[in-house]
Image (cartoon, helix red, strand yellow):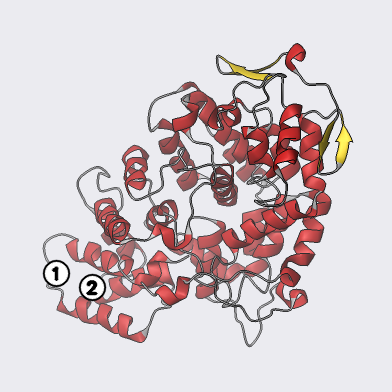
Amino acid sequence: MPMNAIAENTTPKPIDAGWAWARFEPDGQRAWTLRWVGHLYRRAAFGASWQQLQDALKAGPQATIDGLVKPTAVQAGADASSGDDAVTRSGEAGALAAWWLRRMLETPYPLREKMALFWHGHFGISQARVKDGRLMANHVSMLRKHALGSYRELLQAAAQDPAMFLGLNSEASRRAMPNDNFARQLLGNLTMGPGVCDEQDIKEAARAFTGWFVLRGDLRYFEREHDTGVKTVLAQKGAWKPEDIVRIVLEHGESARSIVRKIYRWLISEVEEPEESLLKPLCDSFAQSYDVGQLVETMLRSNLFFSETAYRRRVKSPVEFALGIAKGMESIVPTLPLGSALANIGQQLGDPPTVQGWPGGRHWISPATLTGRLALADAMLSPEGAYGGKLNAGSIAKKHGSAGPDAAAGFFCDLWLQGDVAESIRKGLKEAADAAKSPAGDAWFRDAANRVIRIPEFQLS
């Protein structure tokens, strides 16, 4: 693993914000190549098939990004018919993760799922704390619905979500005994970030949420238990209710800055801490509308996104790692065992470890989890076992004109890494291919695919 590529907290060189957020247009110095196509699909989706990469290369950056951020009516309609009701009715262990992973693999609108995954970590609500599979499924559906919409509307929806209250141990808040867990999460992790408000702000905000109880899975309001008195939150006084608290915290400048920084880390780079001046134009715009889709689109179209500052500056999460393999293999794998395997290497969908979500970055990689990732890749590509041979490396390589060991190794390197690896690695792949003795069946195709997956750069997004 090239640890220098993912080192944390290095000092960045100043970047001109005007250049950074201007729309990327290919030129003689930065051409629209397979390298940038793969980068875009790793960040805005969960990888791509060979045909998708080739189509995007021909279409150019703006048309390709249009397809990711502005789905057609047909795509949006297909995405809407997602079977939410079926998973909502099911409380079975693993059902939510299996359903969502299948959505991520099949959706014609992958950016929605990618951003919903971001919000899942941001809100940090866990089924282990909610203890109700149906409520947790509703919570994820809420994240998906608002994934690229208004963050203001997402917060207002969260303030009416039973899973939020259960997941924060805030299922009962009485006038005489306000529960401050929801207010603490709202004012801290979900908006302004830690250290901005004080304990008194949290206690006053908690009074606005009194009267709300979760009973038999329903969020219910008892007026007699609501504190109707004047509350002072962030220097604003009034007989505030939950919707007022959401408004007040979003009016604070730190809220927009906090969310923009988190999305920057998700889409641009988790390596360097960006300068305040770089993010200021985005923060100012976001504070006016809290339009997540607009913010995401600005980042994805930007010069900065298509620069070395962003390239391979994130570590793939387990979900991104596994789905990137499956997308390249152009097939759907059984997602119930996949969900279990992902939990074993650090990412159990539906169960973020804390209310801060997953720490991400270098925390995804350890000797144990790296070994687990490679074992999962081997199992996914195996002709037997839990994944039933659904991912056939041989058939994909042959389909795209790579029938021999040498050609197959080069194909998988181009498919997953767009050929952008050190010459010594390419030489090693060729030597391994030349040494292949073409054993029975397509075993050497799987071997070629696994060799590419074991390249350190494969772990980076």
Amino acid type of the residue that numbered disc 1 sits on in the rendered structure: Ser
Q: Residue at x 67, y 40 (%)?
A: 186
Q: Residue at x 15, y 74 (%)?
A: 436
Residue 405's tag is 2
First reached walking from the N terminus: tag 1 or tag 2: 2
Q: Which residue is mark 1?
A: 438
Amino acid type of the residue that numbered disc 2 sits on in the rendered structure: Pro
Image quadrant in which you'd find residue 459: bottom left
Tell me how many marks there are: 2
Reply above or below: 347 against 80.
below
Reply above or below: 319 against 441.
above
Residue 81: tell me if it is visible: no
Relative depth, front residue between 210 and 2: 210
Q: Is residue 114 left or right of residue 442?
A: right
SS for tag 1?
loop
Q: Are marks 1 and 2 in contact (CB under 8 Å)?
A: yes
Image quadrant in which you'd find residue 243: top right
User: Can you give x and y, in whole percent of width and height, for residue 146 in the image?
Assistant: 67, 40
Reply above or below: 287 against 125.
below
User: Can you give x and y, in whole percent of width and height, for residue 261 in the image?
Assistant: 66, 60
SS for tag 2?
helix
Marks 1 and 2, how far apart at CA: 8 Å
Residue 261: tell me if it is visible: yes
Residue 447's tag is none
Q: Residues within 10 Å of mark 1 (few under 14, many from 20)?
A: some
Q: Residue at x 53, y 73 (%)?
A: 311
User: Can you give x and y, in whole percent of width and height, for residue 294 in the image?
Assistant: 74, 55
Quadrant of the frame with the N terminus: bottom left
Q: Residues within 10 Å of mark 2 (few under 14, many from 20)?
A: many
User: Can you give x and y, in whole percent of width and height, for residue 231 in the image?
Assistant: 82, 32
Relative depth, front residue between 11 and 294: 11
